[in-house]
Amino acid sequence: MPEGQRAPASPQAARSAGDRESPESPAPRRGAVCASVPQKLAEALSSQYGLNVLVAGLLLCCHLLCFLTALMLLQLLWMLWYVRHSSSHRRLIRLKDTEAGARWLRGSITLFAAITIILGCLKIGYFVGFSECLSATEGVFPVTHAVHTLLQVYFLWGHAKDVIQSFKTLERFGVIHSVFTNLLLWANSVLNESKHQLNEHKERLITLGFGNISIVLDDHTPPCNCTPPAFCSAISQGVYYLYPFNIEYQILASTMLYVLWKNVGRKVDSHRHRKIQFRFHGVTVGLVLGVAVLAATIGVVVAYLIQIGRSKTKSESALIMLYLYATTLLMLMGAAGLVGIWIYRIDEKSLDESKNPARKLDVDLLVGTAFGSSLISWGSILAIFCAESCPPYTWYNLPYSVLVIVEKYIQNLFIIESTHREPEKLSEDIRTLRVVTVCTGNATSLTSFSLKHGAVAGDVTPQGSKMPPAVNGNTCLREGCGKEEEERSREGAPGPACHPHFLQGNAKRRVLRNITAFLFLCNISLWIPPAFGCRPEYDNGLEETVFGFEPWIIVVNLAMPFSIFYRMHAAASLFEVYCRI
């Protein structure tokens, strides 16, 4: 064949090559390099656009609601266009990222979205009550937000797994616009909730005797009467109890949209799908302990909210109760995480190093948001040692603050170790059974196991195939295995059949599932207190005395939302780990 002339390709090969390559790039490697340059430029331009939207929204505090309404309307137009474009090309085969937009994640965002819509209805009622002194924007914003929430949840249910390959530049700008719109809505919710928390915080400091701190109470109510007053008062109190769910909704929507943005133009291996199943079997211990922790947490939160701010004695006892309970819980969580890490480290399973935007984002969020609570904890530790005099209850804050940092570090290691484990093709039970059967030459046990477990055991003894000679007879495989086991017994090293029982097969997985279920419920338990007003960082008053009222309040207001989000995101990651084990 002359040099430079290509060999004729089959129709199937030509068709598959045409699906992978564009007409402008005849050489696959060169075309891939040339295609990656515009993709990186489009990602950089769209990300800079999103950052500019975020900065503009943060600076336009006086007209923030008008700006947010305009951003939501623009996102609504883009989502309607995308849905219409996708429905008109539904017959085309579209690539999907099977790791993105899990069903449980979409279910969680639907629940939070429903509560967000209820919050919007309360805000509309609040606007009606104070309509005499509120601008029309206060009424337009919750209506727009409710419509935006409905369409966005519908969009994420149908398109969170999409790997966009057409109109890529336009779609990148549309998706990144949606990401930063949700981040600005999150910042607005955090700001509104912080105003309410700050007012309660000032009232509680008075009861603890910190009257030397300049305290000016402000209930942030409009300068007019509400009709009827009882209705408006009930709405004002109910709104702030729903803000934590709204905050979680905006963050979940931002993360799902960010994964969609990272998947624009991405090459996906469609054969790496692994079906994830959720099972309750064998996790009784973890569930019972976790439910007990959850019930105890609710009791502690109720007692704390009842006692704090009533008097100095009751406030101090409430703080001591919360510190002791949280310290005990963090110690149990740290011990469970260490056991899980130890089990993973003695396992010889290989790690999954494949690139995945959803998994990378989960890890980055875990590490990044853990910094929020670490910042608060380090501030509390420094305040305890730098203060001239410390009330007795503040010394309970020291082990609590140290354990907050240590427990997050251990838990992050456990989650990262779990998510990067390569799934096995064969279960541990079958692999252990192979070793035992080959070493003992017992073919009957292997046959009965195959008949009992059906399709799974078919991987061990396929139908129509004969038993290997190493199993049917006493060959050199059996002799070699016996020598190897004898040498290991002399040296004291554990062999395949000499591991502790909980390190083998289903028993090992049950231990890991129990640990994961326990940590999952514990993270939900630790999410509840700060989300619903139990914030000792606000209430003990020591940090304000050392660092000053305004600096410490700024630190807490910036770091606390990330600390709250960390617990919910850790719970979501642990749920995914549980389904993978």
Image: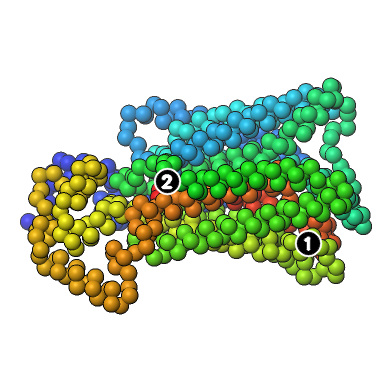
Rendered image quadrant of residue 96 = top left
Q: Can the viewer see residue 54 in this picture?
A: no
Answer with left or right where residue 233 lies relative to residue 3.
Answer: right
Foreground: 170 or 148? 148
Answer with left or right where residue 266 lies relative to residue 306.
Answer: left
Q: Can the viewer see residue 464 in this picture?
A: yes
Q: What residue lies at 23% left-to-right and 73% top-to-bottom?
A: 486
Callout 2 amino acid? Gly
Answer with left or right where residue 561 lies relative to residue 357.
Answer: right
Q: What residue lies at 45% left-to-right and 50% top-to-bottom?
A: 513
In the figure, 7 relative to 382: above or below?
Answer: above
Crowd around label 2: few <14 · some 14–19 · many ≥20 (10 Å):
some
In which quadrant of the rendered image does the N terminus lie? Answer: bottom left
Q: CA distance from mark 1 to mark 2?
A: 41 Å
Please tell me which of labels 1 and 2 falls first in the chain. Answer: 2
Callout 1 amino acid? Thr
Tell me the number on the disc at residue 440. Answer: none
Answer with left or right where residue 457 lies relative to residue 144.
Answer: left
Foreground: 386 or 196? 386
User: Tag 1's secondary structure?
Assistant: helix
Foreground: 424 or 135? 424
Badge 2 is on which residue? 282
Q: What residue lies at 19% left-to-right and 46% top-to-bottom?
A: 448
Crowd around label 1: few <14 · some 14–19 · many ≥20 (10 Å):
many
In the figure, 105 relative to 539: above or below?
Answer: above
User: Tag 2's secondary structure?
Assistant: loop
Q: What residue lies at 39% left-to-right and 26% top-to-bottom?
A: 88
Badge 1 is on which residue? 394
Rendered image quadrant of residue 246 = top right
Which x, y percent locates residue 425?
Answer: 28, 51
Which x, y percent locates residue 230?
Answer: 83, 25
Which x, y percent locates residue 103?
Answer: 45, 37
